[in-house]
Image (cartoon, rainbow, N blue to C red):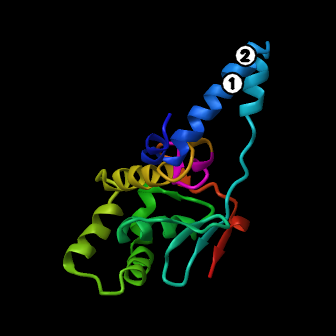
Amino acid sequence: MTNTNKENQCPYEVLVKEVKERIRKLKEYGISEKALSSLIETEQPLLKLTVSRDYRLYLGEQRVEVRMEPLLKALYLLFLRHPEGIIFKDLPDYRQELAKIYSDVRPWGLSDRALQSIEDVTNPMLNSINEKCARIKKTFLGVMGSDIAEHYFIKGTRGKTKGITLPRDLVLWE
């Protein structure tokens, strides 16, 4: 492979090709699939989640920013503030708190459209909350692997409490 081809690839694509080649060589030396799997199945530590003063979300020591639109971020912060979780049918009880968080995240004020979005996302008869949670999940899956990301997004059983399972000692509020 020429340098120009490597330069056009994402850094992880180059690493993936190198790993595949090394795995092929290990197999040639007689290393079993089970032994190779045990090498890969290392448990990844959870990353610290930092919420900055201006409500930006950062992961780990490298402070990789997790970007979300204001309503998604406000909803995420609401659940982050409630480690006990929230039952979706009880979301109307959290409407005022969500509006306050949203106005902090979105300092240019709450328009009628923004207020309607808050009404929609806290209305358990609508699907808005599920759509927003799916988008938050997709955001975290775009930043990290699914095995670790599941601790960062909102999840739970239908009709039961939903929440973020990330241990709160890993959440730093600046």
Residue 20 part of the magenta segment? no
Majority secondary structure of magenta residues: loop
Give residue 95's position: percent from left, percent from top.
39, 72
Q: Quadrant of the C terminus?
A: bottom right
Please identify the residue farthest to the bottom as the structure is shown. 108
Task: Name the residue at 79% across, 15% down.
Answer: 29
Q: Residues within 10 Å of mark 2 (few under 14, many from 20)?
A: few
**Extreme left residue here?**
112
Tell me which corner region of the image, top left, top right, bottom left or bottom right, holds residue 109: bottom left
Q: Which amino acid does label 1 sit on?
A: Ile
Q: Which residue is drawn at 47% across and 43% down?
A: 158
The residue to which callout 1 is attached is 23
Q: Position of residue 114 (x, y in %)?
A: 26, 74
Left-right relation of 167 to 147: right
Is residue 155 shown to the viewer in this render?
yes
Q: In the rendered image, is residue 33 in sight?
A: no
Kindly identify the amino acid type of the residue bearing the numbered disc 2. Lys
Identify the residue at horizontal 56%, vertical 79% (top origin): 52
| Helix, strand or loop at mark 2 | helix
How many callouts does the rendering have?
Answer: 2
Residue 35, horizontal then vertical, whole percent: 79, 21
Q: What stretch is highlighted in magenta?
A: 148-157
Tell whether 158 sits left or right of 148. left
In contact (CB < 8 Å): disc 1 and disc 2: yes
The residues bearing labels 1 and 2 have C-alpha atoms spaced at a distance of 6 Å
What label sits on residue 27 in the rendered view? 2
- Viewer-proximal residue among 26 and 68: 26
Secondary structure, mark 1, is helix
Labelled disc at residue 96: none
Residue 8 percent location from the top left of the image: 42, 46
